[in-house]
Amino acid sequence: MANTMLPSAPVANDGSPDPQEELSPNLQKTPFPNPSSASHDPPPVILTSEQETKYNSVLNTVSSWTTIANTSAANSTTSPITDAERMWLTRECLLRYLRASKWSVADAIRRLLETLTWRREWGLIEHTADYISIENETGKQLILGYDIDARPCLYLNPSKQNTEKGPRQLQHLVFMLERTIDLMGPGQETLALLINFQQMSSGQSPSIAQGRQTMNILQNHYPERLGRACVINIPWFFWVFYKTISPFIDPTTKQKLKFNEPISLHVPSEQLLKTHGGDVEFLYEHEEYWPSLVQLAGERKKKLEERWVKGGKRVGESEVYLKGGDEKSIDESKTATLDEVTEKIQELQTTEKGIQQPVET
């Protein structure tokens, strides 16, 4: 019998399945809620005694904050720090800023305060899913799957650009960064950025000003959040752009950039898009993906908020605890330690009584 070649699935110009043709019933259309079994969780971070001392210095300072500037202007008004802002000041958050500040306590405190003001000035609360929705109608950004180190993956597909250059494009990126953080599991602090320049034209590239602003936001207000960035199908004009903004990129960040490496080396195939070298057949339908992403991230954030309240609304709370991991809250840890001390005292008292009792003859 002659070999019969099966026709390949019809694809659109951007490499995704053509929605006008018959599609496989197994198409992925929504985010993966958890990493695959091929991913492994990051090891816990162990601090030196000196680092722990510096952390406690930062914690003592930020715990005393009662008001925050509303803008970065020198004569800005202030208003009381909110519960959401206090909740953001987790143990891991303070440590990220310390690491990014080369363990300078003063610099970490200054940068934390600047970010709290930036988050107000930027308008994170005002940039709702409904407001941002139009920016993602073509699926130019996707949160889908986890890499081999259990980092959530944020895909950037510049060829699917659907809006004119303006503030909302960058607001869209920040919105997606926040949702990616929502989907991080216990003990995970970083994300994987997957950028595919396939079929991108020079007119779709961001301006130099946008590039510099993006680097400023990522490095100053999301420090230590990038685990790796894989960039593929790089056009010639990207290198012109990269050369221009490269001086503004932190050396540590540069080390995390992977240019034209197979992404399958970094992301399990069962959670990697077929267009990026994996096995996942994906169809972006905004009406299905967007509400699903918003709901999943919202549910995770609600549970985190509930745990923070249950733990006593503490500044410096553990993100592992807040994300549902196996660590206790600060208050629970203190109670457990007190119970252990009490138990030890009781044991010692019992032992002493036994020694003091006279021996019968």
Image (cartoon, rainbow, N blue to C red):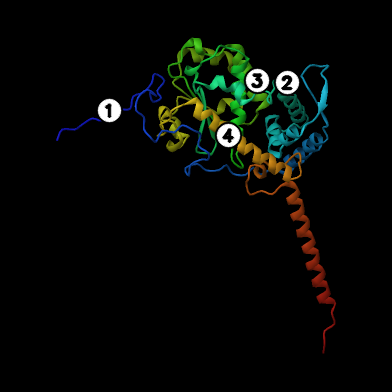
Q: Earlier in the sequence, mark 4 or mark 2?
A: 2
Q: Nearer the viewer, mark 1 or mark 3?
A: 1
Name the secondary structure under disc 4.
helix
Q: Amino acid at mark 2?
A: Glu
Which amino acid type is marked by label 4?
Gln
Of 243 and 79, the residue lying toward us: 79
State which tag comes first along the sequence, 1 or 2: 1
Distance between mark 1 and mark 2 Cα atoms: 53 Å
For the N terminus, which image quadrant?
top left
Task: Name the disc covering residue 216, or none.
Answer: 3
Q: Residues within 10 Å of mark 3 (few under 14, many from 20)?
A: some
Q: Amino acid at mark 3?
A: Asn
Q: Nearer the viewer, residue 105 or 300?
A: 300
Q: CA distance from mark 3 to mark 2?
A: 15 Å
Which mark sits nearer the N-terminus, 3 or 2?
2
Packing grade of label 2 (10 A; few <14, some 14-19, many >=20) is few
Which residue has dot 1 on it? 7
The x, y position of residue 291, in whole percent, is 55, 30
- At label 1, counting other C-alpha atoms closer than 10 Å, the crowd grade (few under 14, some 14-19, many 20 or more) is few
Mark 1–mark 3 distance (CA, rounded to whole Å): 47 Å
Say which mark, if any, is on residue 295: 4
